[in-house]
Amino acid sequence: MTEQLAPMPADWRRALAVVAHPDDMEYGAAAAVATWTGGGREVAYLLATRGEAGIDTVPPAEAAPLREREQLAGAAEVGVSVVEFLDHRDGVIEYGPALRRDIAAAIRRHRPELVITLNHHDTWGGTAWNTPDHRAVGRAAIDAAADAGNRWIFPELADQGIEPWDGVRWVAVAASPRPTHAVDVTEGRERALRSLLEHRGYIEALTDEDPEAYARAFLDRGTEATAPAFGGRPAVAFELFAR
Ligand SMILES: [Zn+2]
């Protein structure tokens, strides 16, 4: 018997997803977002970069606006109309107070009960090494959930009228090798597929496969891998940190 994941908390209204790159949400977590927005919840996205270093054949000055457009379109497919960019530099995001402050400021402005981020661990599981940007942003997002509530950690934010928000109750980490919770994404999976497909320029540079076949296979692998630990239902898993 596979150990079962707990259901994600449902008693919240607003979430903020904080990730490093365009496409980080679309490679899995967007199916949960689609399910939540379909149920009337609000989700906004905050991206640390514009993903300008993500396409080998396209120089950063051209890649940034392309990936920004693809991200806005991808977010819209899953009911997310607010997408903000912090403009840290893709590939060399530094974990530290500057990143924590930027994320804490966004949490204070959006006032979410749930913060969503991407795997902050060293690996995706086993020996599949994670990237430095994901580690930095994931860790900073978890830390900033607390920073947002403490007026003395970044006092300059309150001076700018960005008042503390101590209402984050959970941080949910997508694609963690140590998941604890999951959400049934039967409702959201088709919209999540269209959301990933909006990253067409990125996907076409990445693979010779048909983009739809590639995207569907990737997303189905994720939800099917989680299903045995969630009553056989297609699901997206998270590692949940309660506050
Ligand atoms: Zn990424």
Image (cartoon, rainbow, N blue to C red):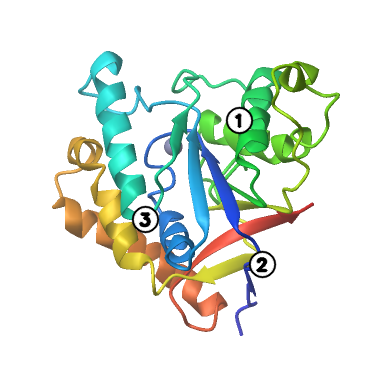
Compared to 5, does 55 lie above or below?
A: above
Labels in figure, total? 3
Can residue 112 be seen here? yes
Q: CA distance from mark 1 to mark 2?
A: 29 Å
Pair 3/1: label in front:
3
Q: Is residue 21 left or right of residue 143?
A: left
The residue closer to the viewer here, 134 or 78, is 78
Which type of secondary structure does the marked residue at label 1 adopt?
helix
Which type of secondary structure does the marked residue at label 2 adopt?
loop
Residue identifier under label 2: 11
Q: Quadrant of ligand 1?
A: top left
Q: Residues within 10 Å of mark 3 (few under 14, many from 20)?
A: many
Compared to 139, does 55 lie above or below?
A: above
Amino acid type for the residue under numbered disc 2: Asp
Amino acid type for the residue under numbered disc 1: Ala
Q: Is residue 178 left or right of residue 215?
A: right
Q: Which residue extends farthest front?
A: 161
Residue 101 falls in image quadrant:
top right
Amino acid type for the residue under numbered disc 3: Val
Compared to 52, does 236 lie above or below?
A: below
- Residue at 71% x, 34% y: name it: 144
Q: Is residue 9 left or right of residue 164?
A: left
Q: Earlier in the sequence, mark 1 or mark 2?
A: 2
Q: Is residue 93 left or right of residue 163?
A: left
Q: Where residue 132 sits: x, y (%)?
A: 54, 29
Q: Earlier in the sequence, mark 2 or mark 3?
A: 2
Residue identifier under label 3: 78
Compared to 200, does 7 lie above or below?
A: below
Q: CA distance from mark 2 to mark 3?
A: 20 Å
Q: Where residue 61 sits: x, y (%)?
A: 28, 14
Q: Earlier in the sequence, mark 3 or mark 1?
A: 3
Residue identifier under label 1: 136
